[in-house]
Amino acid sequence: MVAPVPLYQAKAEFFRMLGHPVRIRVLELLQDGPMPVRDLLAQIEVERSNLSQQLAVLRRSGIVTATREGDTVVYALAGGDVADLMRAARRILTELLAGQQDLLAELQEADRDAVAKSA
Amino acid sequence: MVAPVPLYQAKAEFFRMLGHPVRIRVLELLQDGPMPVRDLLAQIEVERSNLSQQLAVLRRSGIVTATREGDTVVYALAGGDVADLMRAARRILTELLAGQQDLLAELQEADRDAVAKSA
DNA sequence: TAGCAACATGAAGAATTCTTCAATTCTACA
DNA sequence: TGTAGAATTGAAGAATTCTTCATGTTGCTA
């Protein structure tokens, strides 16, 4: 049996879905729990409709869910331990960036903050 | 202090770097140890110069190193536990794909094989 | 040194992805 | 019903990324 979509392509698509600053920030914010678009908008510096576009990408991939609550729409992580993924990525990034002082400093700062959540 | 390159942008770039089927396969293959381009080429269905282009992307990001050994060039993971990252990604993918039978089956098959290595 | 094999690089067109703007849906509430 | 706020959608041009082809470089071996 030949897979209709090769596994390594599904993986690539998954990572590509993560490959946008706004989408990363959304996922990070949602790790603290569900959050309405309004709040995401307040914390991420981006235009409303651009945020909507990025949220649509995340929704299509299935990594987040959206539910309407009256006036507002609340987003949440669909499942899966996104925090784990971010942690693993940060470990690698830390090594890759050794030598690039500024980013490294930020990463370490984030590490200190990352007790229950992971930035 | 304002970072010259925001952290979330570095993260996004990192994931974007992973967002290509050939690059994923290279990283997976290299988890079993360093490997010359010739062997990568034998296992990944892609044209030689396309592979070179993708290897260049990986090299620029710093996630792999290349060393010349006489005739051939040998690639290796630069460090960092790439396997961890892949594992975390697979965990999430498994959930996202629940319902998409074919891919799910492949993922589970891969899980079974993944004793010391992670596909 | 000539020739060949292994890789890398440069560049151009094709394909994707981003950003932004205008238009739309849905809800609340006066 | 009419208006306003919250969020999404559609579409178009800009910007990136991919693929491919031609050319370059390096090292082996005759």
Image: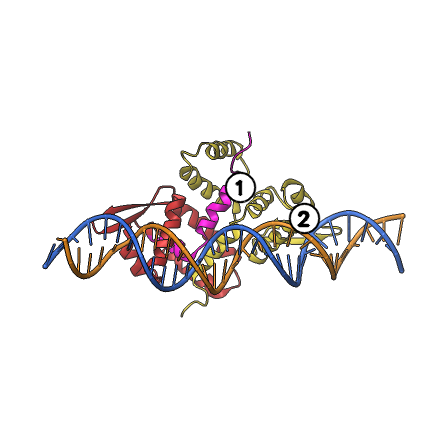
Chain colours: A yellow, B red, C orange, D blue
Quarter of the rendering containing residue A88: top left
Residue A48 numbered tag: 2
Which residue shows up at 64% across the image and 40% down it?
A43
Residue range (magenta): B1-29
Q: Which residue bears the numbered disc 1?
A: B8
Distance, label 2 to label 1, CA atoms, is 19 Å
Q: Is residue C18 left or right of residue A85?
A: right
Q: Quadrant of the C terminus of chain B?
A: bottom left
Which residue shows up at 65% across the image and 44% down it?
A40
Image height of D8 relative to A86, above or below: below
Q: Are marks 2 and 1 in contact (CB under 8 Å)?
A: no
Extreme-bottom residue of the structure: A1
Image height of C12 relative to B35, above or below: below
Amino acid tagged 1: Tyr
Towards the viewer: B15 or B92 = B15
Amino acid tagged 2: Arg
Whole-percent x, y for residue A34 in the image: 64, 46
Q: Which chain contains the residue that carries disc 2?
A: A
Disc 1 crowd, CA 10 A, few/some/many (<14, 14-19, 20+): some
Which residue shows up at 40% across the image and 33% down it?
A99
